[in-house]
Structures are given as C-alpha cells and as structure tokens.
Image (spheres, rainbow, N blue to C red):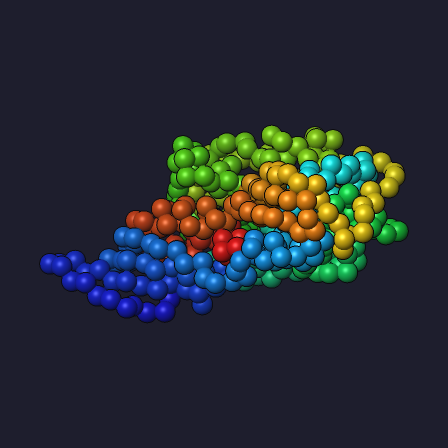
Amino acid sequence: MNGTSENKTSGSSRELELYFGPQHLGMVGNFSITLKVEGDRILEARANPGFLHRGFEKLMEYRTWIQNFPMVCRINVIESGSMEMIYSMAVESLAQIEVPERAHYVRSIYLELCRVSSHLFGLWAYSNMLGFDTVAQWAMYHRDLILDLLEELTGGRVYNIFIWPGGVRRDFPKGFEDRIVETLHTIGSCVPDYNTAFFDNRIFYERSKGIGKITQQEAKELGATGQTLRATGLKFDIRKVAPYAAYDKVEWDVPVREDGDAYSRILVIRDEMIESVHMIFKLLEAMPQGPVYNRIPNPFKWKIPPGDTYVRCESSRGELGLYLVSDGGERPYRVHFRTPSYTNGLILLEKLLQGASIADVGNIMISLYVVAPEIDR
C-alpha cells in the first residue's frame, strides 16, 4: 500500500482513498487498485491494470503472420504456450491447414506441461502472499524442473515459440519422453508434502475459506471462466466442450468445487495440476508415430486467404479466444483476443472487493489468477 490521498469525514464515519499496490505481494505485475475504505472495510474498488505490453493487437496488424509469434507469447508471460496455440489454430482455420496426428499429441503434452508450470507459479504467488515461504520455494523449484524440459525442447525457458501453423517446430528429442515422466514423478511425489504444509493447513483454511465468495449464477452473468467458474461447481472446460489437439483421445476429468470462494479456487488449481500430470502420462502412452509438421509456404512471404475466424482454447486461467481477420495479404487485417484475466481482473475483482477487508485484497486478487498483460493488450 502506498498511503492515502484523500480524507472524507461525515459524522462518525471516516472514508479514506487508499492506493493498494503495485509494490505488494498480493498484486500481479504493475497492477494497482484504488480503494475507498472505512476502517479496514472496503466500500469501493477501482482496478488499474497499468500500462504493460500495450497495443499488441494493433502491432500484430503491422507484422507478418510468422513474425507475430514472439508477440503473442508476451500477452501471457506465465503461460505462453496457450497463446501460441490459439494463434496457430486461427491461422490454420483461415488457411485450411491440416495438422498431423502425432503433432496433436505433442501439442497437448506441451500445453499440459505449460499448464503445470503456470499452476506452480500461481501456487508460489499465493503461498508467498500468505507467508508460506517454504511452500513457495518448493513450487518455484518444481516449476524450474518443468522449465528445464521446455528449454531442452525449444531452447527457451519462458517464451518457447514451439507451436506453429501445421504442427510444432520439432519432434521430441531422444529420451525426452522418459525425462518428462521422471520430472513429473519427482513433482508428484511431493504432493503429500504440499498437502501437509499448505492445503491441509489450518491457516490456509482460515485465510481463504469464505473469502471472495461468488455464486455460480453471478459467475456466469459476469463472464467468469476457468477456476473461478469451476470453483462454483460448473464443469466447463473448452478442452471438454469443444475439444482440440488430442484432448478427446484420452480420458480425463474436470475438477470442480462448490463454494466459489478463494479456498475453492486454489483447490481447483491444485486438482487441475494433478489431473494434468495424469493426462500427460496417458497422452505419452497413446501417442502415435509419424510426422509432427505439415510444411507451409515460405513463412516470410506467406499470404493467408481472405476471411475471418474465431477460435478458442482453455488456457491455465480459463477460456482464451481469438478473432482473426485476413484480407488476403501478408499480415493480419484485424486481431482481437478474449482473455480470462480481463473479466477476472476488472469486473470480478472490483465486485468481490466490495465489503472485503483490506487484509484480503491480495488474497482475492491472487485467487482470481490474474495476469496483467492479458488485460491491456
């Protein structure tokens, strides 16, 4: 918190305007919130996502179809894989490009590794904010193990640029599948420790139970998605309702909780991480042999047929959509993303903070799983 800017005294009540963040463990990136408070109770909240990575949608209209891949990765720094996937799906839809069967499996495994990495980062942020320093260090260490795999596969730890129109850049290197299994077993063996130290801890329960509560009806009316929606009991996941890649090739479940509070949202994230690990094992076992890339024309002179398309996928934060328009040229005519953080970080955050305690601002913020660059695009 950075102090107060205005005092308003009316009778026995005293209202303060309080600036919360961005230098706070409970904020994400350069996000800040202007709070109107009375005592420690919040009367009104105005979210300010800041100016970070601005204007990507317009910048993409001035770059070729292939040059935009490094751009889309930066819309969600924590999980760039879903941004690569949604953009590739849109280009493939416009250009009528077929993806080889094995590439679908490779994409799914890669995306689930990115999801586990993102959830571990979210666990680090939440546990760190509540003061569980040991758990936060475990989560960041285990995330680094996933990043080691991504670095071996793509050459990059954060921005991978692995998924391309027509498939992926390369197949798994020799022995890579065994290293995936070994890494995931290492992380999975520590789940009981996470449960004992954090998820079953009374402090976590008391700090999150009943905090930032939202009903299923409110969640649907306000456009909630991802864990925020599934924490209210609704089994809605794009990987199930509109399958893509190889998500319909293996059996898996959509974890849900019922209470719609911060406690439920964090437990859904934990359960999804465990489900992703099981899904990767099944995908590895079922993955066929064959090519992983359907060659496309010279990408630097590539012209996409005119038309428009809307595609969607399930990022680690919820439903991610992309509306893409081509006028038949070497670059997009119009680009517009539908990101889960836009709703969660603006509409839902402001609503859930009304009536909350100042001490729970960071609690609610992190539980909504917001990434600031997804908002100001």
Q: Residue 201 appears at what percent x and percent y?
A: 50, 50
Q: Quadrant of the N terminus?
A: bottom left
Vertical relation: 77 (above or below) 23? above
- 171 sits left or right of 30 in the view: right
Q: Quadrant of residue 259?
A: top left
Please identify the residue farthest to the left as the structure is shown.
Answer: 11
Q: Nearer the viewer, residue 162 or 119?
A: 162
Quadrant of the image occupied by residue 152: bottom right
Q: Position of residue 165 (x, y in %)?
A: 74, 45
Q: Residue at x 41, y 58 (%)?
A: 48
Residue at image coords 76%, 38%: 97
Q: Residue at x 88, y 39 (%)?
A: 290
Q: Nearer the viewer, residue 299 or 102?
A: 299
Q: Position of residue 362 (x, y in %)?
A: 43, 57
- Quadrant of the rendered structure where residue 32 is? bottom left
Please provide percent x and percent y for residue 43: 27, 52
Left or right: residue 139 versus residue 365 is right
